[in-house]
Image (spheres, rainbow, N blue to C red):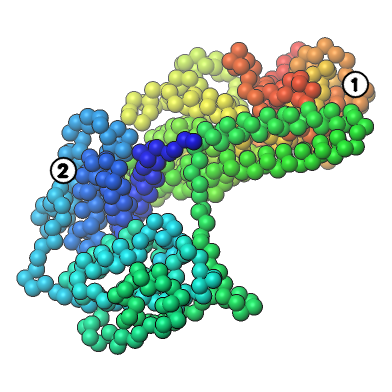
Amino acid sequence: MSSLDPVAVFRTEAAECLEAIEAGLLDLTHKLDDKDVVDAVFRGLHTLKGSGSMFGFDALAGFTHHCETAFDRVRKGEVPATAELVAAVLAAQDHMRALVDQPDADHGDTGPRLLAQLQAAVGEKAGGETAAVVAPVAAAAPAAARTTTWRLRFSLPSNSMANGTNPLGLLDELRDLGECSVKANLAAIPPLEEIVPTDLYVTWEVILTSEQDRSAIDDVFIFVMDDMELEVEEIAAAAEVMPAPVPQPVAAVAALPVVAAALPAVVPEFKPVEAVPARRDAAGQPEQRQAKAAENVRVPAERLDELMDRVGELVIAQSRLSQLASASSDIALRSVSEEIERLSGELRDTMMVLRMVPVATLFSRFRRLVHDLARETGKAIELVTEGESTEVDKTVIERLADPLVHLVRNSIDHGLETPADRLAAGKSEAGTVTLSARQAGGEVIISIKDDGRGINRERVRAKAESSGLIAPGQPLTDPELLQLIFAPGFSTAAAITNLSGRGVGMDVVKKTVEALRGTIDVTSHNGQGSEVSLRIPLTLAIIDGLLVRVGTGSYVIPLSAVEECLELSLEEDLRSRGRSFISLRDSLVPFLRLRDLFRTGTKPDVHQKVVVISTGTERVGLVVDQIIGDHQTVIKSMSKLHNDVSTFSGATILGDGSVALILDVGHLVIAGQQQETQMRVAG
């Protein structure tokens, strides 16, 4: 039995904590006076420091302490939050990430340099005084310490003790702050036979007299603040609010000997602050409280991949069983085959859901990128995200990260103008980059849109002609011209910068998207901006397909692209040889003869079929000899020897053990259109 590596678990949780800190810092850039965000960033830094110290990451804990100190001063009102402070902590956060990944590496003078920036960021706004953020916080003692009396009422979630939270430890920390009186409210404790041993039923009221301020009280509950209920109010004097001690009824104490033993000094002076009756069901019986189930289970990604492979093998085996059962007259065998088909289908659907993750996990990475590029280029940039809840296969998400980085950087560098140029053009000073995602059938469309100057078509053509990509004066449609920006080594930048200009990046984007069986569409309007849309399959593992026969070969068409099927007789086929169009509800739809495209060398069937598919805004018909039926298709990658065969996106294994090729609809339409053009020219 394998055990989890504690350090690996810490690194995973530290990465999530750093992401939360970064998100909070980026939120703070838009509203520097948001106290809730400041508190959230402080709690994240405090958690990271404590966890790092506990797991032996001393360098991380020491460095994070300085950032925590700076934000502690901000939340106490000693210094304001500024853009310089946010930028300094963002830079420091990158160093924290390096200390998590490589704690023993030599990081040079990065730490001291970042701390100097942090000190300057805090000191610049502190009335000329240098903020001592590189040393532990020491509260300056006032001339006369102010003593305050606080009333606290708090309750923890019922599953707190099961999750490792000790309420008595919290009470001890409150006692360390000053004179403290504690009362436990046991009114919600059910009868003994209904008690769940791991549940917490007690709530507390505390009267605390201390020289510490409210932030010290919040620090006691900092790790449980998000799940608990806490009321804190300042009162004049303890004597005015302390009720007379009332002995706890013997029956209640006797029913809970463990609680009574654990709180010997609390129970005798108990008096309910507010009666909390036990929850009851519709029949009037006390309702048993259930511990909150864990919302997430952390599973390594490779285990999901292994499980997906097993499910794929099961689908193939089930397909073979169905074929054997259909050829058999055994009713029992057919019944078992249908049951296994149902179960394997449900298992496949469940597995696909497990692999799906929201696009928000991808979009969230670009907030920091846009923030840094705005500071680097001097441009005012606003990032807008839409459709973050759209779900895509996790493998697609991972492989789209780098292409989207190139597209966003290119949009900011080439597309968006400087604030002065935008104002001169009658636009707002800040440019907008919009990341959006939406689902369309079996595809997800991810778009990167800006409101900048647009693509200069004259410069694109001139660069393409000078590079030999096209012949001088060669006629091109607008989409064909815009697609030239994805050619290797292509760039219209006048000078090489840190962002772009070398002509590498956009061709990588196209190769990556094509490897995902996707397509890229580009639209641009002069002076209004550009939009790049990536059309990507929802999943790369198992799809629903339409199994067809062309000649003697079997092929699979992704079912999500299929609109309808029509019959094409031999006479209609011969009559349409010169035009290859069919009339479909008052519109002409071009069709492609797959037999000619694949050069099968076979004669067409008497009753051919036309499968109408949609590719974006276009509809195209594919002429096949026979439609066999739907097929659960487990996608197998093509070998490296077939990388240049763009007509097929993969292969699958049929129930009889034979191989069927999966048609790449987008590339098939392009290839068919080129062949149709050649036939017309030749004719």
The reply, left or right, for residue 664 in relation to residue 330 is: left
The residue pinned by badge 2 equals: 116
Q: How many marks?
A: 2
| Residue 236 in sight in this render | no
The percent coordinates of residue 484 (x first, y second) are 52, 24
Front-most of residues 178 and 149: 178
- Residue, disc 1: 605
Q: Residue at x 67, y 31 (%)?
A: 312
| Left or right relative to 260: residue 456 | right
Q: Is residue 618 above or below residue 51?
A: above
Query: Does the image show residue 281?
Result: yes
Which amino acid is tagged 1?
Answer: Asp
User: Residue 351's quadrant in the figure?
Assistant: top right
Q: Quadrant of residue 150?
A: bottom left
> Which dot marks residue 370?
none
Q: Residue 460 placed where, x, y %?
A: 48, 25
Instruction: Identify the residue at image location x=41%, y=84%.
Output: 249
Identified by mark 2, the residue type is Ala
Give the image quarter of residue 82: bottom left
